Amino acid sequence: MGSSSSRTSSSGLRYREATSADVADMERCRALDETAGPADARMVAYLDGQHHPRQALAPRTAFVALDGAAVAGYIAGHATTRYGCAGEVQYLYVAPQYRRAGVAGRLLQCLAQWFEGQGIRRVCVNADVDSAGAVPFYVARGASALNQYWYVWDDISSVREAKATMTLDRPDDAPTAFQSAWNAHDMTALAALFHHDATFVNRFGHYVRGVDAIVRLHEPIHETIYRDSTLENELIDVTSIATDAAVTHFWSRLRIGHAHPAGPHEVDTLILAVLTRRDDRWRIQALENVTLTNPRTGKAVLRDQSDKQ
Ligand SMILES: CC(C)(COP(=O)(O)OP(=O)(O)OC[C@H]1O[C@@H](n2cnc3c(N)ncnc32)[C@H](O)[C@@H]1OP(=O)(O)O)[C@@H](O)C(=O)NCCC(=O)NCCS
């Protein structure tokens, strides 16, 4: 296998919906993989609605994982009536150097979100039994065998829920869960931390209400200036104010990378998060982030320098 020995970091990848204009780049990402062979020559026609796999309906989409401008992996799927399902995963491929780092998992989550938006729950996939990864991947992501070649999710939203349920077992988990969603640049994981009507005030005093608005606030920066940033959070305290409500504070250090026009630098903030438990699930109800600044100059300072100014 051409480049399987040199692994590429998968943490800085971006994910976005693709069209037939991306197919040339999607084909290119298989070029070094001697075992894979070329991509399906009907991919452009499929995405343009001119090639229909058996029992396919018109709605369809694709997503790509991007490393810079290069495609690292892709997935595509469509509405169907096959096997009593409403959706089918049509293509899935991750270039060898990006494998076993969760890229296919993220692509499947993107597609699952699209299926959910189409009202599609039961989804099937024709697993390539000659591929070392295909069946283990689908099974690891919760699909069960329909027969030797076909696997099915009764409810595809389970591939998104799996991650969310791991995140906030108690209010003390908030700093770590927020940090891991940020560092994965995973907006699905980020959204899962907040109640649907949560409020968020970022460190520039930008106030938004509702989980969709919180994602809209973060998604563009995670695709651009913060795509290679990392957060390191440290719990300060948790105060229970009722059985189902707690106030937490945590320090947060944002390490900004080369993607930012100002180049690599660090910012320290203090986060106040109020968590509530509803339907037996802890989530953030309100979060406010304050940048540590020198009150005289207004300049941002790091925590270990703030008492020396
Ligand atoms: C199958 C494929 C898409 C998986 O992509 P990936 O990005 O490596 O998958 P992920 O990292 O998200 O894997 C998630 C889990 O799936 C399982 N898995 C994935 N590949 C596996 C393999 N080769 N062997 C065993 N388990 C595997 C593991 O449980 C893995 O979790 P872990 O790494 O923590 O153990 C990739 O190997 C591939 O493109 N193969 C060639 C094309 C292909 O088979 N496509 C599917 C056609 S139906």
Image (spheres, rainbow, N blue to C red):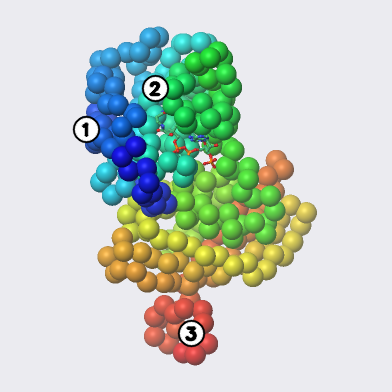
Amino acid marked by disc 1: Ala
User: What quarter of the picture does the N terminus occupy?
Assistant: top left
Q: Where is residue 207 in the image (x, y as percent from the top left)?
A: 46, 58
Farthest bottom residue in view: 308
- Of badges 3 and 1, the one in the foreground is 1
* SS state under label 3: helix
List x then y, in percent, for residue 22: 24, 34
Label 2: state its secondary structure: strand
Determine which of the numbered discs, if any, sits on residue 291 in the image: none
Estimate the x, y position of residue 25 in percent, counting from the top left: 24, 36
- Relative to 23, residue 176 above or below: below
Left or right: residue 75 compared with residue 135: left
Q: Nearer the viewer, residue 290 or 235?
A: 235
Residue receiving disc 1: 24
Mark 2 residue type: Gln
Is the CB atom of the residue marked by disc 2 within 8 angstroms of ligand 1's nearest atom? no
Are the residues flagged by discs 3 and 2 in contact, CB closer than 8 Å?
no
Identify the amino acid type marked 3. Answer: Gln
Image position, residue 265 (x, y; %): 37, 71
Q: In which quarter of the image is residue 248?
A: bottom right
Q: Tell me if mark 1 has few (under 14), some (14-19) or many (20+) residues whose alpha carbon lies within 10 angstroms of its own.
A: few
Which residue, given by chain and number where applicable, does mark 2 sit on? Answer: 90
Identify residue for label 3.
305
Residue found 59% across the figure and 58% down from its top: 176
